[in-house]
């Protein structure tokens, strides 16, 4: 399968969001409190994912903007390695991430209540942001830009938040899904799959409502904007 590099930024946030990544990851090295901005990122993705699954990943995430705008042009853009899509691996990595983060929080707890604590807390988040920028970027260059997104701890948090909403049978009035207007018009060209950042086989995964319910869909509209038949859209979830 030959994956195709196509434009993935369809808004100002997606086009320039990577600047936030540089601000926190690099600026945080000189002014650690910038790392505290990551707390707002975490809050934002938890709230949006409860209502609209992984919408944040494809439309707001600063690292997503970095992968799509900076890494994509230089990436080999190959198939995402299978083990990155393995649930055991992704949740195992999430547990490791939480353990490591908790250890760092414990180390700085002695400074709680002081301005030094805020600096050290900010430094934890900024260096983590820098790690994702470097490691995720390198993996993206070798494979495909959104490979990191398969195991991203923030993405796992989104899945858990969305799953909690489903568990309590909360029906979100805001959730939208990729929808095909008429399956008979699809030419099975596979272009939607070839341009999908998450490499979801779109035209072979529609449910009985002609929608994509795959939790990994980031609702980025890349498939919509590249469908030659113009039969894809982002519509309100029917279930």
Image (cartoon, helix red, strand yellow):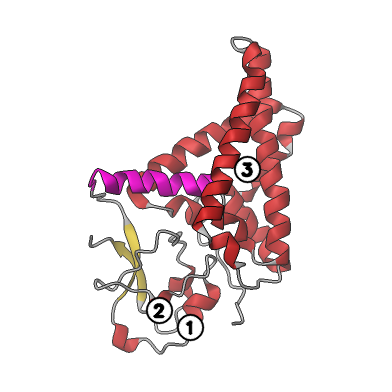
Q: Which mark is residue 20?
A: 3
Q: Do callouts 1 and 2 mark residues in contact (Cβ within 8 Å)?
A: yes
Q: Is 164 situated above or below 209?
A: above
Distance (Cα) linking label 2 and label 3 = 34 Å
Q: Where is residue 1 shown, x and y percent of the image?
A: 59, 82
**Among the two numbered marks 1 and 2 on one chain, the one whose residue lies closer to the N terminus:** 1
Q: Which mark is residue 41?
A: none
The answer to which quarter of the image holds residue 120 is: top right
Q: Is 202 situated above or below 153?
A: below
Q: Residue at x 40, y 79 (%)?
A: 203
Distance (Cα) linking label 1 and label 2 = 7 Å
Q: Nearer the viewer, mark 1 or mark 3?
A: 1
Q: Where is residue 237 shown, x and y percent of the image?
A: 27, 60
Tell me the SS state at disc 1: loop
Q: Nearer the viewer, mark 2 or mark 3?
A: 2
Provide the residue span drawn in magenta: 153-170
Q: Residue at x 54, y 62 (%)?
A: 85
Q: Is 144 situated above or below 32?
A: below
Distance (Cα) linking label 1 and label 3 = 34 Å
Q: Where is residue 160 shown, x and y percent of the image?
A: 41, 45
The answer to which quarter of the image holds residue 80 is: bottom right
The answer to which quarter of the image holds residue 116 is: top right
The residue that label 1 is drawn on is 190
The residue that label 2 is drawn on is 203
Q: Confirm whether residue 68 shows in the render.
A: no
CA neighbours of label 3 inside 10 A, class few (<14), some (14 to 19), many (20+) = some
Does the magenta run of residues contain 15? no
Extreme residue toward the top, this view: 113
Pick the front one: 214 or 196 = 214
């Amino acid at each position: 399968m030959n994956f195709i590099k196509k434009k993935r930024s369809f808004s100002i946030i997606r086009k320039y969001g990577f600047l936030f990544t540089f601000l926190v990851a690099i600026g945080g090295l000189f002014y650690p409190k910038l790392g505290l901005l990551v707390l707002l990122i975490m809050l934002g993705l938890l709230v949006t994912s409860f209502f609209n699954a992984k919408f944040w990943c494809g439309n707001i995430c600063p690292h997503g903007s970095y992968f799509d705008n900076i890494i994509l042009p230089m990436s080999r853009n190959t198939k995402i390695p299978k083990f990155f899509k393995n649930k055991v691996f992704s949740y195992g990595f999430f547990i490791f991430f939480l353990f490591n983060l908790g250890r760092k929080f414990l180390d700085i707890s002695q400074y709680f209540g002081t301005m030094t604590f805020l600096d050290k807390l900010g430094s934890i988040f900024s260096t983590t942001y820098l790690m994702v920028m470097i490691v995720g970027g390198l993996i993206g260059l070798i494979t495909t830009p959104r490979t990191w997104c398969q195991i991203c701890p923030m993405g796992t948090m989104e899945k858990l938040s969305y799953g909690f909403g489903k568990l309590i049978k909360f029906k979100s009035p805001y959730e939208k899904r990729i929808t095909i207007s008429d399956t008979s018009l699809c030419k099975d060209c596979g272009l939607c799959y070839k341009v999908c950042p998450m490499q979801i086989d779109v035209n072979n995964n529609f449910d009985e409502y002609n929608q994509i319910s795959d939790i990994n869909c980031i609702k980025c509209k890349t498939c919509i904007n590249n469908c030659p038949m113009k039969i894809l859209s982002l519509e309100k979830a029917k279930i």
